[in-house]
Amino acid sequence: MSATAQALSGEAGEADTMTDGFHLLIDALKLNGIETIYNVPGIPITDLGRYAQGQGMRVISFRHEQHAGYAASVAGFLTKMPGVCMTVSAPGFLNGLTAVANATTNCWPMILISGSSEREIVDLAQGDYEEMDQLAIARPFCKAAYRLTYAQDIGIAVARAIRSAVSGRPGGVYLDIPGAMLGQVMDAVEGQKTLVKVIDPAPRMRPSDEAVARAIGVMKEAKRPLIVIGKGAAYDQSDDLIRQLVEKSGYPFLPMSMAKGILPDTHPQCASAARSLVLKESDVVIMMGARINWLLSHGKGKQWGEPGGKRFVQMDIEPEEMDSNVEIAAPLVGDVGSCTEALIAAMDGEGISPPKEWLDQVHTKAEANMQKMSTRLQNNNHPMDYHAALGVLKQAINDRPDTILVNEGANTLDLARSIVNIHKPRHRIDVGTWGVMGIGMGAAIAAAVETGKQVLAVEGDSAFGFCGMEVETICRYNLPVCVVVFNNDGIYRGDGENWGGGDDPATTVFVKSARYDMMMEAFGGVGAWVKTPDELKQAVEAALSSGKPTLINAAIDPAAGKESGNIGNLNPQSVVAQRLYPQARTQK
Ligand code: ADP
Ligand code: MG
């Protein structure tokens, strides 16, 4: 029953026939199917969280707004409903804003609801408590931003926020709620009439017949075709259609990191292990919900082979995405499901099937690379290296494919992405389009809360440092999250030296052999400190079968990492470094 209806059913008395901004906001969210709020309490929204819990919503309170926000954005990715994050004013709002910006960049729907101080004082800059013009600040970082001044507008504001977040290209939305608005009182019957249920918030968008025919025309001419599947396709949840298109076409496919598992990485057409070859040699590439951005070298350069040697078919819900980096020969504007369905239907009788030589070439390369990798994964080096540790985790996910993998770090990310196979859609969550560090605990919490599944979070020690305090949240809500910290004593590597020769540690190293496992123990969870693949295997087994909050501190060779992982080329170069710092040559 809504709070408003409850008020009405109570004993007579004036308070019973009234409602207020707090309860209208909760009713508006619930009416639209939003059941969970990712929250950090404080002025002026402390009571809003209490009341939401009182009204049967799940309110997960975090230790820092950034992680509550990341959790909300991941909830949006997993469910196609906007995840909701709630924060206090000014500093709390700014912390949450990072997550809204990240959600918008990743095209994930979320709504940041922040309390704000008194408008009339803020607007005259009279020095209010946590004074800040939050609405203006939020605008450039999100898809849409709205401010609520009157309780009677809550229904329409929430409807606008939801529709803005999920329709078209999804993104982050900011909803500003001045504290005073929450306390506004109105007649409960009138209040209920102001609520809006959003009908068909993310309408399907079908590509035109003409656009489909154009795409088929390009596909018919392909000699070395490739399908690239991105996280927009994972978001779309048209998993069966995507599989049908891949299998009916016979094209090799390459999943972007968060699209892994839409089709299992072990699928015979998966070309991940021949990534360089297929990017370079393909002549027609079908992009499904994946942008041709930095993660794909902008579709240009050595990685992509001969300039002008490729024709792209691109499915995207955002028309402006077309030609963002390279010419798109056949744009398919629409949702991935509708575009895929249309292509499948139009392929009949068109004789689309890739030449055998191409498939053989891809297959041979992939097999050889997988073979090379599998020997590296079984090593027993001491100290343990990334490959040995990831060999264990790969097996753990193979054994329990329902586990959701969260992954961040530099080397920890790059290597886990290519080593650990994912078998189910939306079972891998990582640093996304920005490559942001610190998403791990928020993502793990959201994955556990939204799906009820076991989560395995594989974290570099540096990445974990950005969000580690949320292990308390994991313990408090008793979530089935196992965190494995790849502890190599530092950022990229743990063996750096101070190039100025002073006593301070190098800028990229941490305390040696830090006991991250004790952080989990501090809050009642299980901690383990492991130094060999066997110990890691035992600890992961125990964690995944018990479902208990666990942190496994896995000691990794401090000398095993590569500077910036696979993207060291993005670091600017100094012309004088080699002369000034002899270590520059040896230490990286
Ligand atoms: P990846 O990082 O996996 O390559 P990106 O985040 O770069 O993926 O690209 C995702 C793309 O998917 C975005 O351009 C976005 O507009 C698009 N997109 C999001 N949702 C849908 C959808 N339902 N249907 C089609 N395209 C979508
Ligand atoms: Mg590290």
Image (tube, rainbow, N blue to C red):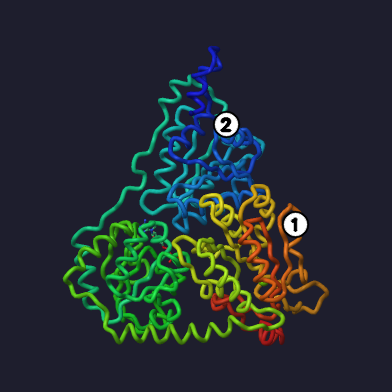
Query: Is 380 situated left or right of 435 in this image?
Result: right
Instruction: Check disc 1: other Cα within 10 Å, few if <14, some if 14-19, many if 20+.
Output: some
Which of these two is toward me, 440 or 574?
A: 440
Per the image, label 1 sits on a secondary structure element best described as helix
Marks 1 and 2, the one that precedes in the sequence: 2
Query: Residue 490, position in %: x, y?
Result: 70, 72
Identify which residue is drawn at 66% across, 80% down. Answer: 560
Query: Residue 432, position in %: x, y?
Result: 50, 63
Residue 118, can we see it? no
Residue at which label 1 appears = 521
Query: Residue 251, position in %: x, y?
Result: 31, 75
| Above or below, 138 relative to 102 | above
Viewer-nearest of discs 1 and 2: 1
Per the image, label 2 sits on a secondary structure element best described as helix
The disc labelled 1 sits on which kind of residue? Glu
Identify which residue is drawn at 51% across, 17% down. Answer: 17
Disc on res. 120: 2
| Above or below, 457 relative to 357 | above
Q: CA distance from mark 1 to mark 2?
A: 48 Å
Which of these two is toward me, 191 or 582?
A: 191
